[in-house]
Amino acid sequence: GVITGARSTEYLLEKSRIVTQASDERNYHVFYEMLSGLADTEKEKYGLQTADNYFYLNQGGCFKIKSKDDAEDFRALLAAMQVLSFTSEEQDTIFRILASVLHLGNIYFHRKQLKHGQEGVEIGSDAEIRWASHLLQLSLDGILRAMTTKTTEARNERVVTPLNIDQALDARDAIAKALYSSLFSWLVQRVNNIVFKGPRKTSIAILDIFGFEDFKENSFEQLCINYANETLQYYFNKHVFKLEQQEYAKERIEWQPINYQDNQPVLNLIAKKPVGILPLLDDESNFPKVSLP
């Protein structure tokens, strides 16, 4: 037999890396490759500067990797796009979205006192939001509202609530993560449409495990990723050790029993109802006024 095609499926893209990085860490390589490899006229077209000018790229302080040539890797990326028949319009759209993510990260806010003692925000970086609006071909007012207000619909009523400065920064980051994540998903599907010819018959599946994450500052995303890793580890233990040894015993095969660490208690701690961490968080978040840690 021969391989007739392939298909990739994405799980748990590390979205937090798009907006924050630990010390000596980089954002996704494509940003640095784009800034190093684009011609000056193209960078001017997208309003791009060097990597150290962007908040989403300069938090880790790692702009160069000795063993990596970002400009050369960008040329390889362009060549791969040509092989996969990406049109010039598609490539332009990809770089527009990537550039808009960088511009969004440089948007900052000032506190603004509103009526009735409410706290709101106003944009403190007009040029960056205009670049994002231009590159994404979205209205300036629409992007502004998305980052500075929250709209709630109840029955036939729509309530617009101003965001404070922390909430506005979270909204900005959420938009950036959604843009990159959507682009990534589209790229995976675009490649699948080319390399997977179908119909699906026999197949070999390969899993690239995420790897456990333990940063100086961990978030809910690290909890989810590590829970997924624990689940995969449990599956591995069950099939490679537990079920296999049960089969040996059933067939009365002599073997040396293998001891392994059963991580079921860890899974129970995180997800077992009703007192696992995730069920408790879910219950707490459903209350109108949640308790603070």
Image (cartoon, rainbow, N blue to C red):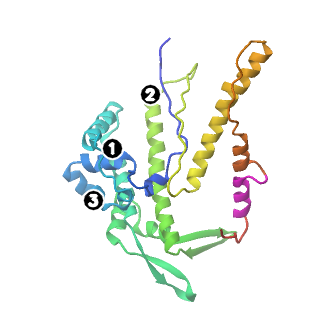
The residue tagged with tag 3: helix, strand or loop?
Answer: loop
The answer to which of marks 3 and 1 sits earlier in the sequence is 3
The residue that mark 1 highlights is: 91
278 within the magenta span? yes
Q: Main secondary structure of the magenta part?
A: helix
Point out the stretch of residues depicted in magenta. 274-285
Q: Amino acid at mark 3?
A: Gly
- Above-or-below relation of 123 to 242: below
Q: Nearer the viewer, residue 258 or 49?
A: 258
Q: Nearer the viewer, residue 125 or 139?
A: 125
- Above-or-below relation of 186 to 21: above
Q: Nearer the viewer, residue 210 or 165?
A: 210
Residue 137 falls in which quadrant of the image? bottom left
Q: Amino acid at mark 1?
A: Gln
Residue 154 in the image: x percent, y percent? 68, 69
The answer to which of marks 2 and 3 sits earlier in the sequence is 3
Q: CA distance from mark 1 to mark 2?
A: 19 Å
4 left or right, relative to 26: right
142 within the magenta span? no
73 left or right, relative to 123: left
Quadrant the C terminus occupies: bottom right
Residue 285 at least partly seen: yes
The answer to which of marks 1 and 2 sits earlier in the sequence is 1
Residue appearing at x 25%, y 48% in the figure: 36
The residue that mark 3 highlights is: 47
Q: Amino acid at mark 2?
A: Val
Residue appearing at x 74%, y 16% in the figure: 248
The residue that mark 2 highlights is: 195
